[in-house]
Image (cartoon, rainbow, N blue to C red):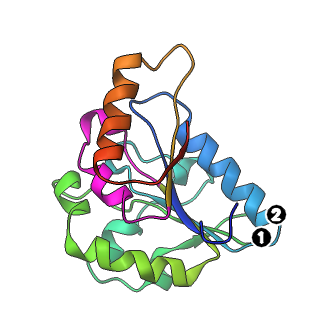
Amino acid sequence: IKENLKMFAVVSPSRGTGRTTVLSNLGVALAQKGSRVLLIDADFRNACLHRLFRLENSNGLSLFLLGKPFEESVQETSVAGLYVLTTGPLPPDPAKFLRNPGFEKSIGFFLAQADFVIFDFPPLEKNPEIAPLASLLHAVFLQVGIGSTRESELMIAYDNLNRANCNILGM
């Protein structure tokens, strides 16, 4: 990964593409190479990272954005150097919650905590507000599922990311 690509997201047009698995494996690989990696689960309606890494989800991103200290919100995994900020409790309106100015302000803070920060955003199909958030990151990888992602879904997702001026690195 290029030196200036420290904060990115793996996004998908729809559910079932393996997005969370891909970003988790990427996080593990980077941590095993000696980097400090922070995975952030921002898919409030379908939180998966806590289950994948067998972590609690009682604290996390939602409470951090409401003022809980980062140290009390983030969790260490069994992989040295790999940390996860789970979603935490489900906010009343997850889409609106992510558009909160506090989220935008926190992005720089997250980068100061690790060598790499990888976001797990909800699928773009029903969450078009994710594209402007993803544009705040260094890059976006658009994950598609062979046989499960329709071409029309892919084109809509790509167009949304492109209109938001996201740095799309691959599909």
Q: Give the labeled residue for mark 2.
A: 32
At x 68%, y 71%, the residue is 3
Magenta residues?
120-138
Name the side, left or right, on which 118 lies relative to 160.
Answer: right
Q: Which is closer to the viewer, label 2 or label 1?
A: 2
Quadrant in which the C terminus is drawn: top right
Please tell me which of labels 2 and 1 falls first in the chain: 2
Name the side, left or right, on which 151 lies relative to 89.
Answer: right
Q: Amino acid at mark 2?
A: Gln
As drawn, the residue found furthest toward the right would be 33
Q: Give the labeled residue for mark 1.
A: 80
Q: Amino acid at mark 1?
A: Ala
The relative height of residue 155 versus residue 12 in the rendered view (above or below) is above
At x 61%, y 54%, the residue is 54
The relative height of residue 63 versus residue 142 in the rendered view (above or below) is below
As drawn, the residue found furthest toward the top would be 147
Q: Are marks 2 and 1 in contact (CB under 8 Å)?
A: yes
- Residue 128 counted in the magenta span: yes
